[in-house]
Image: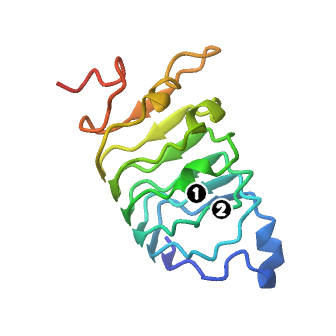
Amino acid sequence: QFTGSLPTGLGSNSTDHIRRLRYLSLSHNRFSGTLPSSLLLHRMYYFDLSYNDFSGPLDADSFDGWYRMRHIYLDHNQFTGSVPESLVTAGEGNMRSIYLNNNKFTGEFPTPKEWAKDNSKLTTIKLQNNGLTGELSTRLCELFVFENGDMIELDADCNICSCKGLCNNCK
C-alpha cells in the first residue's frame, strides 16, 4: 500500500505527461492529507481516491475544467465541509457515477438548475453516511428511474432523501 499525500503540483506544466492522464485509480491505499487544489487533470475521465485517509474540505474550484470526467470515487475517506458545485458540474453533463459516501460532508448536496436534466447519463450517486442536510432536489429524483434497461441507483441517508419510491428503507 502507498502512503503519504498527493503532490501539490500533480498535473502542472512541469509534469506535462501527467496532464494527459485520463484514468487514475489510487484506491485502497493509505494516502492522507487534503486533496491539492492545484490538480490540473482536465483530461481526467476516471478518478478514484476511494478507501484512503484523505481529509479536510474540497476547494470550491477543485474540479473546474474537468470537462471529460465521467466517474469520480471519493468514498470512504474523511473529507469534510460542503460538496463543491464544481464536483457535480464536472464532465459537462456526462457524469456516470459519483461516489461520495462514507465521508464527513455537511450542508446540502448541490444541484444547479439544469444539472439533473443535463446529466441524463448519470447512473449512480452514493451520498450515504455523511452529515448532509436538507432534502435532495426533486430534479435529482427524476433521474432515478429505469431508462433503456439501465438501473439507476441512488443511496442517501433518510434525512435527505425526498425521492418517492427510492426511500423505501426510510420510515
Residue 159 lies, in percent from the top left, at: 24, 38
Q: Amino acid at mark 1?
A: Ser
Q: Is residue 132 left or right of residue 89?
A: left
Label 1: few (<14), some or many (≥20) within 10 Å?
A: some
Position of 2 relative to 102 (above/below)? below
Residue 160 x %, y % = 30, 38
Q: Which residue is farthest bottom?
A: 14
- Residue 111 percent across, percent down from the top left: 50, 42
Q: Are marks 2 and 1 in contact (CB under 8 Å)?
A: yes
Q: Nearer the viewer, residue 156 or 49?
A: 156
Residue 106, numbered label: none
Q: Secondary structure at mark 1?
A: helix
Image location of residue 4, percent across then percent down: 48, 81
Q: Which mark is residue 64?
A: 2
> What residue lies at 62% left-to-right and 38% top-to-bottom?
96
Location of residue 53 (image quadrant): bottom left
- Could you say which quadrant of the image residue 156 lies in? top left
CA gap, disc 2 and disc 1: 5 Å
Question: Which of the numbered marks, if any, corresponds to residue 86?
Answer: 1
**Mark 2 / mark 1, whichever is N-terminal:** 2
